[in-house]
Image: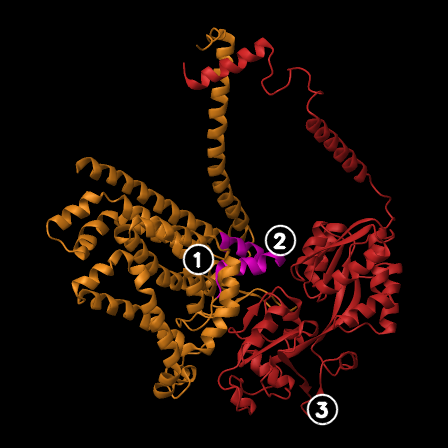
Amino acid sequence: MTEPLPPRPEPRRQWSRRLRDRLATLLITAGGLGVVAAVLAIGVFLALEVAPLFLAAEASLGWGELWREYWQPGTLPGETPAYGMLPLAWGTLKAAFWALLFAIPLALGAAIHSALYMPPRLRSRLKPTLEMMEAMPGVVVGFVAGLVLAPWVERHLAGALALALVLPAGMLLAGMAWTRLPPGLRRRLLPGWAGLWLMPWLALLATLSLWLSPVLEGLLFNGDLRHWLAARFGLDYASRNALIVGLAMGFAVIPGIYALAEDALTGVPASLGEGAQALGATRWQSLWKVVLPAAAPGVFSAVMIGAGRAVGETMIVLMASGNTALMTLSPLEGMRSMAATIAIELPEAVPGGVHYRLLFLAALALFAFTFLVNTLAELVRARLRRRYRRLEAAT
Amino acid sequence: MSESEAMVYAVGAAHQRGTAVCGQPPGQWWRGSPRRQLTRLGVALLLAFCLAGSARAADDEVVGTLGAVGSDTLAGLMLRWGEALTERYPAVRLQLQASGSASAPTALIAGTTRLGPMSRPMSEAERDAFTARHGYPPLEIEVARDALAVIVHRHNPLESLTLAELDAIFSRTRRCGADEPIDDWSQLGLAEPTGRIVLHGRNVASGTHDVIRLHGLCGGNFRLNVNEHPGSAAVVAAVAAESAAIGFAGLNHLTPSVRVIPRRDGESGERHPPSPATVAGGDYPLARSLYLYVNRRPGEPLPGPERAFLDLVLSQEGQSIVEELGFVPLPAAARARQLGRLSDGPVG
């Protein structure tokens, strides 16, 4: 038998409870708005720091100067500095391009496989592993890429390029061979577990290509691939180049793209894919014609967020790219990105000087780019969520 | 009524009845379990300790924290001097931030620190900015000299380089008199390593960069494909990892995995490796003085910690630390001159 509760509190107590309720709501709303205001304030601050460059009465820099090809801000007495920002913008885009070229196929492939074909037990083991990839600090990834990976790739250039060609071809070969297996064996090697039973095959291919590549190099390239590239195509090989940066930054960007793309793909109502298969579509047809088009906006926004991350990543490019302010198309040469330039040069630029304000201009460009890309990606994802709700209501 | 409302009424009812909600009668906070009393005692002692510790020391006592912001070339040296200072005066500690020579004038002008180690002299613009802010020029004390070594991989058999050859390798302007750029190791007469020369250097932030441009490239510009590293140790690591690499780094960062290339005189063919003797004699031009800039109002004495630090730096003990770390100590005459500047005050 429970004790009877005491009578309701007096109206004064009720009013104070309502007041506390309203206060709490106000504080939480203020917190949310404060975050938005802080982000916008950063943009306004950057714009205010840059404005005197172009708007002051004695404008110290014309727009034309920024479109030059040399970035040489440090000067000995008696020299005029060169403030061409083209190499920096080029380097940023080049690094982001190679990172996305490496990351997008891997991340999207992993997302499709794990969302549609992987059994839940394996998927639950995969997600934490990918999150560990994301948790690794950029400095560590850049350090390993610059001091361990770059010298190794330089010494075994033929082997590294062979790996890049042989592994994807080997996977396609394994897929073709799988369709021709006897049904008993095919039941053992389920496609959902392909992540596991492909490992020995890929390890074998990797070992073979690394072992045979010196032989092939001797046969095809006169023993020195670097020399052959320089002689035949005029391509200089820099030890820290766009390929290394692409690998390292791709490693950092893959988990982000994977998480969002997998989110979008699992959100597609299962009835759509199953309906397509019930009507006779193969697995590939139901993926390519039904599921992917339904999830396309989410996948697109995942790629955009990955691009935003790739453009803004600083430490990896700083440590793995050699920081050479070049403008070349060659993936075998280094580059200098805007973020790395800001990190290297801002601590010692004279505050209020032209160099200082130009670095702020670079920061403003990066801020605007990532802000726009992320906002667009979020809008696209919101539309996708509404579309899924309509699809689920319809089926 | 909702669950939360029921909970609120229950607590309020208990309070009204006078029973303990948290195990303690309301309104008697000084009582409580022994553990709670010990915690309160500990907090009170901690507060008292902090208040006592923040009592100001007199201005010329050698106590407190000595701040310095500036060159990373001088970082090891400053830390060793700081340790020696703490050995002499246990109440003082050196706090160093080594982000590059160009960060020192910024910090001195802003007043963040009174000491600014720099591996190059202050430029006119920096001096003017300091004078505009504080009303007097900064005090420049030369504390050591540094030789910059040209390094190659340990398996590279290169014997020596003239200044013109160094210029032709590193620069795109070739102001030291070379006719053609040197891009390939074969142009230097070497069979091993093969291929193009891979260049490593420092970024624009460092004093090393400016010294090499001034004395090594005769004021010219580096090539665009020189890999820029944030510190001398990174240059050494990069050169040690690539057999076709060449770079320059301070003498004090060298390891056995790289070889130092002496300078060959163009006419006489004599070899001058970087060492205190060649630097002092002028035969090895890739050298520079290392400075400590001090913010000191003329006519006023330096505060205790700074004065003790500078006395230590310019003493025999301080200069033997310089030699231990691989730099070039000041000759006796120069030391005496710097000590004189300390006492007289800045002359610009």
Asked if labels 1 and 3 touch by Cβ distance under 8 angstroms, the answer is no
Q: Amino acid at mark 2?
A: Pro
Instruction: Name the residue at 57% across, 66% down.
Output: A81
Q: Which residue is mark 1?
A: A252
At a point 39% along the width and 47% down the height, the residue shown is: A374
Give x and y (percent) for residue B299. Answer: 87, 52
**Colour-to-chain, red:** B
The quarter of the image holding the C terminus of chain B is bottom right
Chain ID of residue with mark 3? B
Residue at the disc numbered 2: A351
Q: CA distance from mark 2 to mark 3?
A: 46 Å
Left or right of A296, for residue A75: right
Q: Are marks 2 and 1 on the same chain?
A: yes
> In the depicted view, which residue is nearer to us: A95 or B192?
B192
The kind of secondary structure element at disc 1 is helix
Above or below, comparing residue A2 to residue A180 in the picture = above
In the rendered structure, the answer to whether residue A137 lies left or right of residue A109 reads: right
Q: Is A329 rendered above or below residue A306? A: below
Residue bounds of the magenta highlight: A336-363
**10 Å neighbourhood of mark 3: few (<14), some, or many (≥20)?**
few
Residue A89 location, x and y as percent? 44, 61
Prevailing SS of the magenta stretch: helix
**What residue type is disc 3 on?**
Glu
Q: Is residue B302 visible?
A: yes
Asked if the stretch drawn in magenta spans residue A337, the answer is yes
Q: Compare residues A149 and A195 and report the one nearer the observer.
A: A195
Q: Which residue is mark 3?
A: B270
State the separation of the CA atoms marked 2 and 1. Answer: 33 Å
Residue B266 sits inside the magenta stretch: no
Q: Secondary structure at mark 2?
A: loop
Give the drawing colour for chain A: orange
Numbered disc 1: what chain?
A: A
